[in-house]
Image: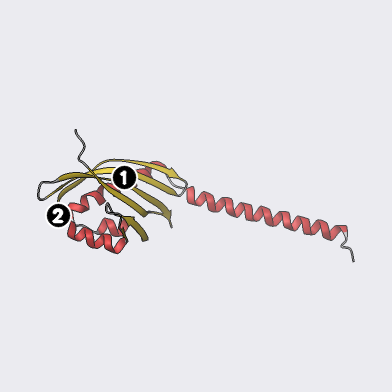
Amino acid sequence: MRPSKRLVWIDSASRISLCCIVSGLCSVCCQCTQNYDHKEAERYIIESERQWAESVASGDTAVIQRILADDFVGVDPKGRHYGKSEMISDTRNAPKYFASNRLNDVKVRFYRGTAVAQGNESWQRHNGERGRFVWTDTWIRRNGRWQIVAAEDLIAPESAR
C-alpha cells in the first residue's frame, strides 16, 4: 500500500520540525559554552596562574584545589605524570626546597570553552640555585568554572635581564 501524499507531507514536515528543534537546541547549547567575558576569564586565569606560582614557595594548597580539575593530568620536568592529589601533596612540601617563585609572563588564547595559557616563572631554591619553569596549561570551562585539565612544565635556565 502506498502512503497518501498528505501522510508523506506530514512526515516530511515532522522531520523538518525535528531538525529545526535539534538545531535550535545545539545552537543554544553552543552559545552557553561561549557565553562568558573573555577579558574577565583572562584576568581570572592569569591571577590563578600567579597564585599557583606563589604557592610553590608558600605551600598554600587552596589555589590548587580550586583550579585543578579532578581529572587533571600534568607532566613534570622529568616527564612523569601526576594528578591533582600529587600536586596538592607536592605543593605542601615545596617550601622545603623553594625560597621563592614568581610569575613572569603568561599569554592566554581562547578556543570556545577552552583556553591555553603559556608562561614562565622564576624560582630560587634555599641553596641559592635559580631557574625558570616554562609551562603550558590547558583550561576548560565546566559548569561555569574555569579549571586546568592538563599541564606540562619544563625547567629552563634563568633568563638574562
N-term-proximal mark, 2 vs 1: 1
For disc 2, the marked residue is 97
Where residue 43 sits: x, y (%)?
33, 43
Q: Can the viewer see residue 144?
A: no
Where residue 111 sits: x, y (%)?
46, 45
Above-or-below relation of 160 to 153: above
Q: Residue furthest bottom?
A: 1
Q: Residue furthest left?
A: 127
- 137 horizontally vs 16: left or right: left
Look at 42% across and 53% down and name the residue there.
141
Contact check, label 2 and label 1, Cβ < 8 Å: no
Q: How is the image coloured?
A: secondary structure
Name the element at disc 1: helix
Quadrant into which the C terminus falls: top left
Name the element at disc 2: loop
For disc 1, the marked residue is 46
Above-or-below relation of 14 to 38: below
- Label 2 CA crowd tier, 10 Å (few <14, some 14–19, many 20+): few
Above-or-below relation of 46 to 93: above
Quadrant into which the N terminus falls: bottom right
Q: Residue furthest top?
A: 161
- 29 horizontally vs 41: left or right: right
Label 1 sits on what residue type? Ile
Label 2 sits on what residue type? Tyr
Look at 74% across and 58% down and name the residue there.
14
Q: How far apart in space, not on screen, are marks 2 and 1 (Cα)?
A: 25 Å
- 41 horizontally vs 105: left or right: right
| 132 vs 55, nearest the viewer | 132
Where residue 49 sits: x, y (%)?
29, 48
| 125 vs 80, nearest the viewer | 80
Look at 19% across and 60% down and name the residue there.
92
